[in-house]
Image (cartoon, rainbow, N blue to C red):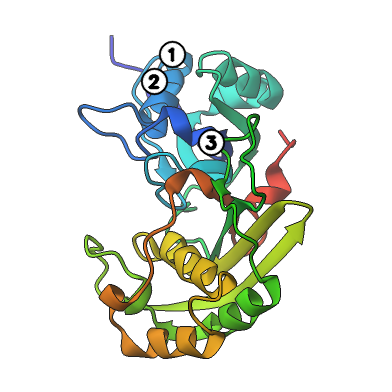
Amino acid sequence: MANVVMKKQRVAMVIEFDGKAFHGWQQQDNATSVQAELQRALLAVEGEAVVTIAAGRTDSGVHSEGLLVHADVCSERWQRSHLAYLHGLNSRLPDEISVVGVRAVSGNFHARFDCRERTYRYQIWNRNTPSSIDRWRHWWMPRPLNINAMNEAAAHCIGRHDFTSLRASGCQAAHAVRTINSVEVKKDGFAIAIEVAADGFLYHMVRNLVGNLVEVGLGKRTPDEFKALLAMQDRSRGAATAPAHGLYFIDALYDDFSASDLIGCC
């Protein structure tokens, strides 16, 4: 009997995860990754291997509230009940990962190549004592930070620039030119959030940006000196890279929807 070819439906899934438990998004041979766990759950649901493609990669320890991923699944199973599919998938995932939104997309949709903008948030705890509750959710900074100076410095990043000064040595991108659409430093009590939206990011770009903005906030570098650093296109002149556990992937923007639009939807 000939094998029956199951009709496929491409779906977009929004993935939330606690990065502390994983060595990043991308599947690796000798480390636990978010992609490997998601594909293991899809295998259990679908009965066959399913390849997933994400809007971007996250490093070891980095979290997500809105990483968008696409995959091709059984159309009949998907159409039977979107909600049941979502719950069935989540029941097979570890507690540190959840699919928090899904929708059908066209067969030529691509989570990475069709993404127009990605947004990250970096969280800092700015108090003279650390938090016992959220220790792995932010970077503890005991000395006061000047938020106005940090925003003044961050404004120099807006637009299309060569960000070599914020590019890690292991970056494999063909060039360092990217367009940052917005960047803002916000404070709420002891919590500081730095949100950055761009057409794309270099390896460790956000964490290197945060490291330099913190130097400005501490008075070690002026906003104009930060602007000069960007113009130098020399990573060795910049601050140390901020730790991974304060970083969150929070949104991915497409022509007719964003990852954040899908959260809570099925």
* Along the line of sight, the residue nearer the viewer: 264 or 155: 155
Tell me whether the residue at label 1 lies in contact with that at label 2, contact meaning CB atoms closer than 8 angstroms: yes
153 relative to 171 in the view: left or right: right
Quadrant assignment for the C terminus: top right
Which residue appears at 70% of the width and 51% of the height?
191
Label number found at residue 242? none
In the displayed image of the protein, which residue is found farthest to the right?
A: 189
Who's the residue at 28% across and 81% down the image? 234
* Distance (Cα) linking label 1 and label 3: 31 Å
Q: Quadrant of residue 197?
A: bottom right
Q: What residue do we see at 31% from left, 16% from top?
A: 3
Classify mark 3: helix, strand or loop: loop
Can you tell which mark lies on residue 136? 3
Q: Residues within 10 Å of mark 1 (few under 14, many from 20)?
A: some
Q: CA distance from mark 1 to mark 2?
A: 6 Å
Q: Which residue is mark 2?
A: 40
Is residue 160 depicted above or below 64 in this figure?
below
* Mark 1 / mark 3, whichever is N-terminal: 1
Q: Nearer the viewer, mark 1 or mark 3?
A: 3
- The answer to the question of whether label 1 and label 3 lie on touching residues, with beta carbons closer than 8 A, is no
State the image quarter where residue 98 is shown.
top right
Q: Label 3 sits on what residue type?
A: Trp
N-terminal of the two: label 3 or label 2?
2
Query: Which is nearer the eye, 221 or 23?
Result: 221
Residue beneath disc 1: 44
Can residue 181 be seen here? The reply is yes
- The residue nearer to you, when weighing 49 against 63, is 63
Q: CA distance from mark 3 to mark 2?
A: 26 Å
